[in-house]
Amino acid sequence: MVIRVLLIVVFFVAYVTTEPVAAAGQCTKGSEFEPALCPLKLGRVSKISILKNAAKSPVEQDNAVVCDNFLLSQARLRQYWSQAKIIREDDLHHTLDWSPCYASGEILFSDGSSAEWTVNQFRSGSLLMRNGKKISLYCPTCKFSPFQW
């Protein structure tokens, strides 16, 4: 039984620490209000495409909610990704606040791999790698415009 549990743990750590995730032992401990944060190591970025900017989620029905001020530039996206941390997808949905304002697009790495990205106004986001792996992100240190904190 112990061996079976150890094999499951080893498999999980190997899955979680595959590219672009860094070493699992470097994660911070989470709390009720802050998710556990793990290092994000992205490959060299060769191209960033912004397909939606200052977008409002279609599920947000309140006409008073306006997202016009949430405009991300390529420079701000690079800054975001350089400071963002990996979080569990469950924490993305249950620990962090949701924002209806977002930007999205595509990122191409110098090795030819690519991903679809989304970043919202409350500093969380995701990368959906072409291999199907989804990486949830949060940047607690991204206290610069246009993010809200």
Image (tube, grey):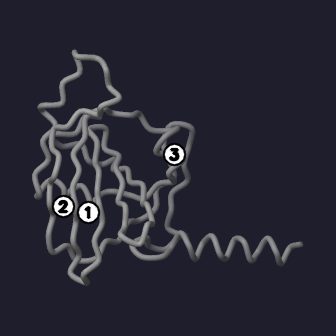
**Residue identifier under label 3:** 91
Which residue is located at x 18 percent, y 56 percent?
A: 77
**Residue identifier under label 2:** 78
Tag count:
3
Work out how far the residue at label 2 is from the one at label 1, CA to CA, in angstroms: 6 Å
Mark 1 burial class by Cα count in 10 Å: few <14, some 14-19, many 20+: some
Residue 17 in the figure: left or right of residue 102: right
Closer-to-camera residue (26/73): 73
Work out how far the residue at label 3 is from the one at label 2, CA to CA, in angstroms: 23 Å
Work out how far the residue at label 3 is from the one at label 1, CA to CA, in angstroms: 20 Å
Which quadrant does the N terminus fall into?
bottom right
**Residue identifier under label 1:** 82
Where is residue 35? Give x, y as percent: 50, 47
Q: Marks 3 and 1: which is nearer the front?
A: 3
Q: Quadrant of residue 8?
A: bottom right
Label 2 close to label 1 by CB (< 8 Å): yes
Which residue is located at x 54 percent, y 48 percent?
A: 30
Residue 115 in the figure: left or right of residue 15: left
Q: Secondary structure at mark 3?
A: helix
Q: Residue type at mark 3: give it.
A: Asp
First reached walking from the N terminus: tag 3 or tag 1: 1
Query: Outermost residue, front direction?
Result: 58
Q: Residue type at mark 1: give it.
A: Ser
For residue 89, above or below residue 82: above
